[in-house]
Amino acid sequence: MRFALGMWVMAALALSGCARQASVRSAAPPAHQSRSNPETHLSADYVHPPSGLRLKAPQGWGFVDKPEVDYVQAQCQPTKATGDLPVMLLQASKISTDLSMEALVAGYSKQMARGVDSPDIEKDEQIKGGTGGAEGYEIVFTGKLKHKAVKGRQVILRRDGWFYVITQMAPQADYPRYSAAFETLTNSVAFK
């Protein structure tokens, strides 16, 4: 999952002219262990210091100390789950472009087939009023990942020269079970 999804997101960022940007985890004390690595602890909050983006994990979820893929700045997962899904990933990149948000998202959407087989876009629209003070766009999609049906949501934000992609994905049959957690994380978006 992580390689295909990673290629998809990286291709989209490259298309939009975004550069990779390092980040630092928040200093919140670890509360739980990661499902993928028992030595990794989960935190309730995440801060992206270069841009001031703040996220809060939904109840029963946490941010890993170090995401499994180096170009992902934050990885949030259930504290008591196993496997790759469900997962929420954040990528943040500093961008310099005159393209409109619609043009950035259109280019990004065209790259979806690189990460998810047979993607079907269910929703592709601007978020009225933005999210957390950032200009926002939302894409909801279904497709196959490693031959398994998945459903995902991407919230794409732009603010003060930063481009953010929050990817939220689960097995398609389980998506309704996680949609409230996905919405909680999205609603937690704030900037200092």
Image (spheres, helix red, strand yellow):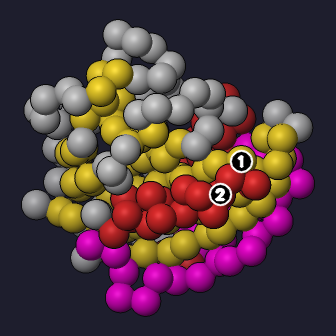
In the image, residue 161 lies in the stretch drawn in magenta: no
Please give left or right for residue 74 compared with residue 156 in the image.
Answer: left
For marks 2 and 1, give the CA distance.
6 Å
Q: 94 or 97: which is nearer to us?
A: 94
Please give left or right for residue 188 compared with residue 76 in the image.
Answer: left
Q: Residue furthest top?
A: 39
Q: 103 or 151: which is nearer to us?
A: 151
Q: Is residue 102 visible?
A: yes
Q: Is residue 73 visible?
A: no
The amino acid on which the numbered mark 2 sits, given as a three-letter code, is Tyr
Magenta stretch: give its range: 103-132
Q: Which mark is residue 171?
A: 1
Q: 63 or 10: which is nearer to us?
A: 63
| Residue 23 point in image, percent of width and height | 27, 35
Seen in the picture, residue 123 relative to 16 is either above or below; the reply is below
Mark 1 and mark 2 in contact (Cβ < 8 Å)?
yes
Seen in the picture, residue 155 relative to 165 is either above or below; the reply is below
| Residue 180 point in image, percent of width and height | 48, 65
Query: Would you call the spot at circle 2 few (<14 residues within 10 Å), some (14-19), or many (20 or more)?
Result: some
Callout 1 secondary element: strand
The amino acid on which the numbered mark 1 sits, given as a three-letter code, is Pro
Q: Which residue is mark 2?
A: 175
In the image, residue 111 lies in the stretch drawn in magenta: yes
Residue at x-position 63% and y-position 63%: 176
